[in-house]
Image (tube, helix red, strand yellow):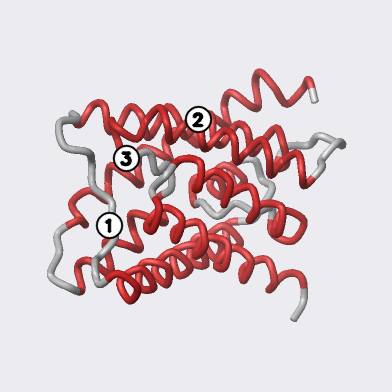
Amino acid sequence: MGLKNNKYLIECVGSYFLVLAYGISGDALAIGFMLSALIYIGAVTSGAHYNPAISFGAFLLKRISGVEFLVYVLAQIIGAFLAASTILMFSGAVFYVEPPIGSTFYQQVGVEALFSIILVLVAFVAWIGKSANKIPSAYAVIMGFALIALVTIGQGLSGAFFNPAISISTSILDFSLQGSSYVFVPIYTIAPLFGASLAVLIYKYLIEEAE
């Protein structure tokens, strides 16, 4: 199997373990450190996106093609779905994405979009952008700590997922068991993708030339 195929497998496996961290623990430190480990493993092979929002940004920056983007996202969703299925097997409970009780629609959308900007920008500057000083360990540590901060700040307002693959995959499993978490998919898909689009603009016009 060549590198071209390996990168999709890495995206699937990485997404699997990242969603396990979200679903089993939900703790910001656990999620962030898991992301660091997974990025260190997969950065050289796939870029270690594990997130359609980051892959969308990479596509807009022309770092990956349209076909690659679609396969990246499919791999991420499959990995996340398998993780949700594993959580169901382990716990007997369905892990799915829904807003915290008491938060408003505007808080949910705002946090998912705004904090996705930061997460995607960190990925651009640390790895996906054109910097010649790309170091997998630095990329892993920076992304991990960024996610810890963002989850800690945003968890009470939106759940702090910033990753459409988590919502899409878990809602599929939930729907198959007569659940209705699919109604929240637009929030957790459109907001991060919109945030990624803004991150591309910020990167291209404020950061790229300085690298």
Name which residue lies at 62% across and 45% down: 58
Residue 141's disc is none
Pointer 3 local density, CA inside 10 Å: few below 14, some 14–19, many at least 20: many
Name which residue lies at 60% across and 31% down: 121
Q: Which residue is mark 2?
A: 149
Task: Give the quadrant of residue 171.
Answer: bottom left
Decide if residue 180 is on the left or right side of residue 200. left
**Secondary element type, mark 1:** loop
Decide if residue 137 is on the left or right side of residue 200. right
Q: Nearer the viewer, residue 96 or 71?
A: 96
Report the amino acid beneath label 2.
Ala
**Secondary element type, mark 2:** helix
Residue 96's disc is 1
Measuring from the top left, give residue 153's x and y in whole percent.
40, 27
Report the amino acid beneath label 1.
Tyr
Q: Earlier in the sequence, mark 3 or mark 1?
A: 1
Residue 159's disc is 3
Name which residue lies at 43% across and 36% down: 151
Measuring from the top left, give residue 200's x and y in whole percent.
58, 32
Q: Earlier in the sequence, mark 2 or mark 3?
A: 2
Name which residue lies at 73% across and 26% down: 208
Q: Nearer the viewer, residue 95 or 6?
A: 95
